[in-house]
Image (spheres, grey):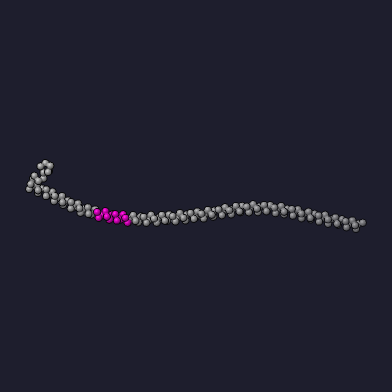
């Protein structure tokens, strides 16, 4: 009887110990499962944030490329316009130089003509004075005669 009782008591002790170990293992498993769910939730949240950040980065890269492309096109257009302005400026400068040279030539001719005109005025005056001295009636207007 004692032997049976000792066997029975040993069995119950082992059963209790094993039941306790199983319960502890189940609690630990449940805790790990809950942690896994929390970690998975955090992972999904971070993955969504990362995806949003990637989309934002991609949009920024697209915007940068678009802005760079537009800036390059604008720069090319401004360079083309600058070349046209420089070319037109050179043509206008050459035209101005030609016009200034022509003006200078005309001013020299005008000066020579004025000098000749002055000489002619003196000659005409002398001629009229001489004619008036020779024939005072020759200078009288035709309508008065």
- Who's the residue at 65% across and 53% down the image? 44
**Residue at (61, 52) in percent of width and height:** 49
Q: Tell me the chief SS of the magenta region.
A: helix
Image coords of residue 40 (percent x, y): 67, 53
Question: How many dots with numbers?
Answer: 0
Relative placement, left or right, of 137 versus 33 is left
Which quadrant of the view contains residue 95? bottom left
Instruction: Give left or right: position of 121 versus 76.
Output: left
Q: Position of residue 9 (x, y in %)?
A: 87, 55
**Which region shows up in magenta?**
94-106
Along the line of sight, the residue nearer the viewer: 75 or 145: 145
Quarter of the figure that contains the C terminus = top left
**76 or 28: which is nearer to us?**
76
- The quadrant in which the N terminus is found is bottom right
- In the image, farthest residue toward the top: 144
Q: Is residue 130 left or right of residue 55?
A: left
Query: Is 100 covered by the magenta stretch?
Result: yes
In the displayed orientation, state which residue is furthest to the right.
1
Q: Position of residue 73 (x, y in %)?
A: 46, 55
Residue at (80, 54) in percent of width and height: 20
Residue 10 is a magenta residue: no
């Amino acid at each position: 009887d004692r032997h049976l009782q000792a066997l029975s008591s040993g069995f119950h002790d082992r059963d209790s110990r094993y039941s306790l170990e199983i319960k502890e293992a189940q609690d630990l498993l449940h805790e790990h499962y809950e942690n896994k769910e929390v970690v998975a939730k955090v992972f999904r949240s971070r993955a969504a944030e990362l995806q949003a950040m990637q989309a934002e980065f991609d949009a920024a890269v697209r915007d940068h490329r678009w802005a760079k492309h537009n800036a390059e096109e604008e720069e090319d257009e401004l360079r083309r316009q600058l070349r046209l302005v420089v070319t037109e400026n050179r043509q206008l400068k050459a035209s101005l130089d030609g016009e200034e040279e022509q003006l200078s030539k005309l001013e020299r001719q005008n000066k020579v003509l004025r000098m000749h005109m002055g000489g002619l005025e003196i000659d005409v005056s002398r001629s009229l004075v001489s004619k008036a001295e020779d024939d005072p009636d020759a200078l009288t207007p035709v309508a008065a005669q």
